[in-house]
Amino acid sequence: MKKETTLIKNDSLNRKTVIKNSSLAALASTSLPLYAQAKKEAPKQEAPKAKAIIHIFLAGGMAAQESWDPKMYAPVEYRGPFRTVKTKMPGVHLSENMKNIAKIADKLTICRSMTHGEAAHERGTHNMMTAYRPSPAIKFPSIGSIISHELGARNELPPYICIPRIGNEFQGTGYMSSSYGPFSINGDPNDSKFAVKDLIAPKGMTAENDQKRREILNIINSDFQKKSKDDGVIAMETFYKKAYDLMGSEKARDAFDINKESKEMRDRYGRSKMGQGFLLARRLVESGSRYVSLNYGGWDHHQDIKGAMNKNMPDFDKAFAALIQDLEASGLLDETIVLATSEFGRTPKINKDAGRDHYPKVYSVAMAGAAYKRGFVYGKSNATSTEVEEDPLSVQDFAATVYSQIGIDYHKRIMAPGERPIDIVRQGKICQSLLA
């Protein structure tokens, strides 16, 4: 009652104001309890489980039947040419060419029900890299670029790195500034002369010459900034600054120096491009990089799938198992996500050339680390791998779950050209069943 009297006595308030305030008070009396209840019921934003992601992309479309989801009881034309191997998960088998991975399967979540509708390499790759179907109207940013944009650099390392190089055009920044693009090592870590060129000053470059170059560059950039605020100009300035910072960082040089690893450790991963790439990825996330993309193609097996798998799988089997064991031993697996994916799977039936063709309707991916369950198989394909039988996992749900674990709100919208806000993930949700 006192408050009401005070309002009437105030000369600056007229009858209309009093009515308005009374209305707001009435609204507040009904809405505030509802707001309080909603706030109470809203889930708390937990601290991110993961600090980094290693994403192994096996381009071409790795066959689930010859890897994560063998069909041991199917007719031979569906089963394929390989036997199976028991894993550390009771009752779970992998293809016999994954004998090392079978020993660490109790650290993995294997999804046997990944699905989408894009059967062309480019479109399937776009799906897995961006969580969006391709559109002629807009270029979407890759998961790595989103992470770079949202989380930035850590410990002087580029937030987004590609090994051995950028694997495809969909690993870029899309509608975002190119300053969020990947840093590519452009080399084979298994090469005895391997060095990341962008970390080494040109031959004969003195500190004095370097300083003069920087001063000239700053003058040019300043002049451009006065004349133009174009995103391309700003991105280029950011690019040069990052390059200089990287060249001057002892931490970065050490992280990329794979020769600092012992001979025994390098042998454990395998003396191959893939093996040493996986080892380098571990060094980079350990040192501070947020997202390392490992790109290894050659899985498009339309012919002689047995010969092709016998050629490709040993390096992957050895390197992947060593990576998981290494991360587990150091404690890094608790804060690092490891993903092994492909753009789609292969047809249920062996074709006339003893291979399998493109098939996005059902395929497999593997996950490990952070809050992902350990020793768990999610989803199920039917007896011949023609359909998802239980718990389909969409690309959008896969991506939403990954983002949630590294602390990114996948509902957030990022502004595209033309003042157009775009969801990080559209129509996706966290798959809680994948998480412990």
Image (cartoon, helix red, strand yellow):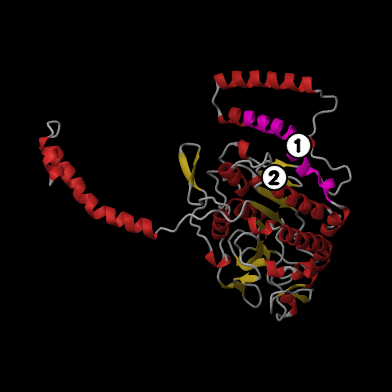
- Location of residue 98 (image quadrant): bottom right
User: In terms of secondary structure, what is the magenta stretch mainly?
Assistant: helix
Residue 82, compared with residue 322, is above or below; it is below
> Pointer 2: what residue?
161
20 is within the stretch colored magenta: no
Give the side of residue 2 with respect to residue 305, left or right.
Answer: left
* Residue 122 seen in the current view: no
What residue is shown at x 60% (from left), y 49% (from top)? 143
Q: Quadrant of the C terminus?
A: bottom right
Residue 168, compared with residue 13, is above or below; it is below
SS category of the residue bearing label 1: helix
Name the residue nearer the viewer: 315 or 138: 315
Name the residue nearer the viewer: 1 or 147: 1
Residue 243, compared with residue 194, is above or below; it is above
What residue is shown at x 55% (from left), y 48% (from top)? 135
What residue is shown at x 70% (from left), y 60% (from top)? 61
User: Where does the image place residue 374, in percent across and percent down from the top left?
Assistant: 64, 68
Badge 2 density bin: few <14, some 14–19, many ≥20, Cα 10 Å:
many
User: Where does the image place residue 349, in percent across and percent down from the top left?
Assistant: 70, 72
Q: Residue furthest front?
A: 2
How far is mark 2 from mark 1, CA to CA? 17 Å
> Pointer 1: what residue?
250
User: Where does the image place residue 428, in percent across and percent down from the top left?
Assistant: 50, 57
- Location of residue 346 (image quadrant): bottom right
Q: At label 1, which amino acid type do we have? A: Glu
Q: At label 2, which amino acid type do we have? A: Ile
Earlier-in-chain disc, 2 versus 1: 2
SS category of the residue bearing label 2: strand
Magenta segment: 236-261
237 is within the stretch colored magenta: yes
What residue is shown at x 75% (from left), y 54% (from top)? 297
